[in-house]
Image: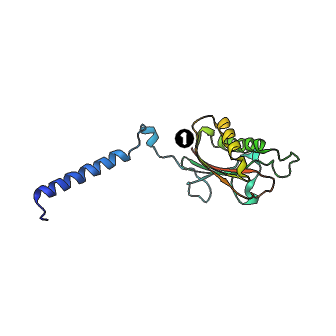
Amino acid sequence: MRLTPSHLALFLAGFLVASLGGTVLARPAAGPAAQDACPTWPTAGSGGQKMIVNPPSMGEPAGRAYSQAVRVGNMLYLAGQGGAPPRGSNEPAGDFATQTHRAFDSIQTILDAAGASLDDLVTMTVFITDPRYGDDFVRLRGEILKRDFPASALISIDHLARPEMMLEIQAVAALPCR
């Protein structure tokens, strides 16, 4: 096939349309405020790229070498939150519903400390120790979150780090820039 000026013109026109179309399609549909980058925070050793979130009411997790959550830009990455009572507590482990509510209460405490709410969750990975808890978890999650459900994975495993734990929820939230 011989490349003619018509072919070249069609190719260039198609390339131009595709390039401009890609630029237009790649722009967020939201207004200018949604396009602004989130500021960074000066924190020791992180170059201002991350902020550790450890609500004082949850105790100090550093002894176990983790943080309750880490914020980078407008994303908040939460450590797994289990439903068992705090270590050293005399409180009973409770049934699956009790543990589910405890786990979501812990998530809410962390979100509160970061200036967010359960509505800001975008994804969660849920580990349960018995697949028979699956339907109960789905029902309880619906009651707790009510709407705007995050993307989610529900995974059945043999056991968690603490034998009395029936579930653990790890989550990610998208937060408004401060």
Whether residue 135 can be seen here: yes
The residue at 55%/54% (across/down) is 49
How is the rendered protein coloured?
rainbow
| Residue shown at the point (86%, 52%) measured from the top left | 88
Percent position (x, y) of residue 53? 66, 49
Name the residue that disc number 1 marks.
Answer: 176
Residue 114 screen position, x and y as percent: 63, 43
Image coordinates for residue 59, horizontal then vertical, percent: 77, 49
Q: Residue furthest front?
A: 132
Three-letter code for the amino acid on which mark 1 is drawn: Pro
Callout count: 1
**Quick one: quadrant of the C terminus?**
top right
> On the picture, is 47 further left or further right than 130?
left
Examine the image and state in which quarter residue 11 appears. bottom left
**Is residue 53 depicted above or below 34 in this figure?**
below
Q: Residue at x 74, y 46 (%)?
A: 56
User: Of 49 and 165, which appears nearest the observer?
Assistant: 165
What residue occupies the far right of the structure in this picture?
Answer: 90
Pinpoint residue 133: horizontal percent, then vertical percent: 72, 47
Front residue of 74 and 95? 95
Crowding near the residue tagged with mark 1, few <14, some 14–19, many ≥20 C-alpha atoms within 10 Å: few
In the shown orientation, is residue 56 left or right of residue 48? right
The reply, left or right, for residue 128 in relation to residue 71 is right
Is residue 117 in view from this perspective?
no
Q: Residue 156 is drawn in which quadrant?
A: bottom right
Quadrant assignment for the N terminus: bottom left
